[in-house]
């Protein structure tokens, strides 16, 4: 069963999604990482990566395809990694250019955050971005994240030195923004 | 043979060897190191078994995106602690840390190990930025990093739980040119 938002779903990755993932990886702008990868990834590489995923009940990561409800189109993907059970995870998102500015990324993040806080009971969610990616910083701020660490001139991209940024959102801050939800976990400290 | 960057006036840093593991387990289990062992992959708050130390040794021996070295006294060859640098994703911006056995503290070993490690990173690799992570309750660690020329880059909030309260991880960093300026100043 997918995670459901108003206009989109977060569903499991499928073989037919691989061409989109290759295209996203081979676009230097949608890559968005602090150290670009060469735009030469192939469909066979991605198929092997997809088929190599193994079953486990002890996963510390997840990857969801963002699917638009109305059209059924795949708009990108969203992940969490570095899961520490009942404590923290780090999220990441990559959205195809036609969906930029449409609210897709924000809604996908909101759906994933609800899963991480309401279902997994995390105390904090983090993300990494950089000072050259103002879209990501603005989106994260809209979601309630704040810049907690700024590593000065720690990266290089597009011919510029950039600051690596860690942003985080505490559980208490998330629930303060979600008046429709009640936090049933006892507070810490 | 030890390469020049890892030999200092009072200490030498070299890869761990099987003969080091008893001494390694001994100091890792010192209560004063609880929560600041920098042994990524082992729970920093639980007692460390010899088997866990052997797994740690195996992992350190096969590291590809960083290095963890034993810190030894030049005069006695005693194991003093460990030092690591991890560049992971991007060699521009490694992390580093030095852990000295609490029995061997306040003798300048950590400073010497840290400077050797920085000398390696800025002298032998493309690093332009180096960072170290220290818990906000570790005032000694923060003072140490400040003395090494590091400055605060921020707080990773709610890094963990200690004495029933969440604590933050302070990130401190130094740039290549800041390090070079300190070298000129002597």
Image (cartoon, coloured by chain):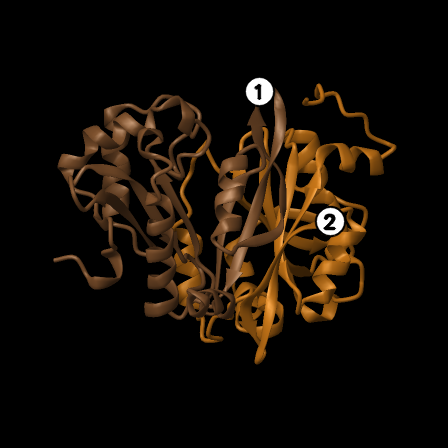
Chain colours: A orange, B brown
* Crowd rating for badge 1 (residues with CA inside 10 Å; few <14, some 14–19, many 20+): few
User: Residue A67's quadrant in the figure?
Assistant: bottom right
Front-most of residues A57 and B132: B132
B125 over B88 or under it: above or below: below
Q: Position of residue A9 (x, y in %)?
A: 70, 48
Front-most of residues B103 and A135: B103
**Residue A69 visible in the shown view:** no
Q: Where is residue A148 in the image (x, y as percent from the top left)?
A: 67, 48
Residue sticking out furthest to the bottom: A159
Name the chain under label 1. Answer: B
Residue sticking out furthest to the front: B186
What residue is pinned by disc 2? A146
User: Residue A182's quadrant in the figure?
Assistant: top right
What residue is pinned by disc 1? B163
B50 over A70 or under it: above or below: above
Q: Locate residue A17 relative to residue A110 in the image: left or right.
A: left
Q: Is mark 1 on a helix, strand or loop?
A: loop
């Amino acid at each position: 069963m997918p995670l459901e938002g108003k206009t989109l779903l977060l569903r499991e990755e499928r073989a037919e999604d691989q061409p989109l993932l290759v295209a996203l990886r081979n676009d230097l702008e949608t890559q968005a990482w602090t150290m670009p990868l060469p735009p030469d990834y192939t469909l066979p590489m991605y198929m092997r990566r997809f088929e190599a995923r193994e079953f486990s009940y002890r996963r510390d990561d997840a990857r969801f395809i963002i699917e638009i409800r109305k059209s059924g189109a795949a708009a990108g993907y969203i992940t969490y990694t570095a899961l520490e059970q009942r404590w923290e995870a780090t999220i990441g998102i990559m959205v195809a250019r036609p969906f930029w500015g449409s609210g897709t990324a924000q809604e996908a993040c909101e759906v994933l955050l609800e899963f991480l806080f309401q279902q997994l009971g995390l105390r904090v969610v983090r993300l990494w971005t950089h000072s050259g990616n103002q879209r990501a910083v603005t989106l994260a701020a809209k979601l309630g994240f704040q810049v907690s660490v700024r590593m000065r001139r720690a990266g290089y991209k597009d011919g510029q030195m950039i600051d690596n940024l860690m942003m985080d959102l505490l559980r208490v801050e998330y629930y303060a923004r979600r008046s429709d939800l009640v936090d049933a976990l006892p507070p810490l400290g | 043979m030890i390469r020049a960057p890892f030999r200092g006036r009072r200490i030498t840093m070299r890869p761990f060897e099987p003969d080091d593991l008893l001494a390694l387990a001994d100091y890792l289990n010192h209560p004063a190191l609880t929560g600041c062992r920098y042994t990524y992959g082992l729970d920093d708050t639980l007692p460390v078994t010899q088997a866990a130390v052997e797994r740690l040794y195996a992992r350190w021996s096969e590291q590809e995106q960083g290095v963890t070295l034993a810190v030894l006294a030049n005069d006695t060859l005693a194991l003093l602690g460990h030092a690591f640098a991890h560049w992971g994703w991007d060699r521009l911006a490694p992390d580093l840390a030095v852990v000295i056995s609490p029995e061997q503290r306040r003798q300048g070993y950590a400073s010497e190990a840290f400077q050797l490690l920085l000398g390696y990173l800025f002298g032998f690799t493309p690093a332009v930025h180096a960072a170290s992570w220290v818990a906000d309750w570790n005032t000694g660690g923060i003072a140490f990093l400040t003395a090494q020329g590091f400055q605060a880059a921020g707080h990773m909030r709610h890094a963990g739980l200690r004495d029933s309260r969440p604590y933050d991880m302070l990130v401190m960093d130094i740039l290549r040119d800041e390090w070079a300026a300190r070298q000129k100043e002597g």
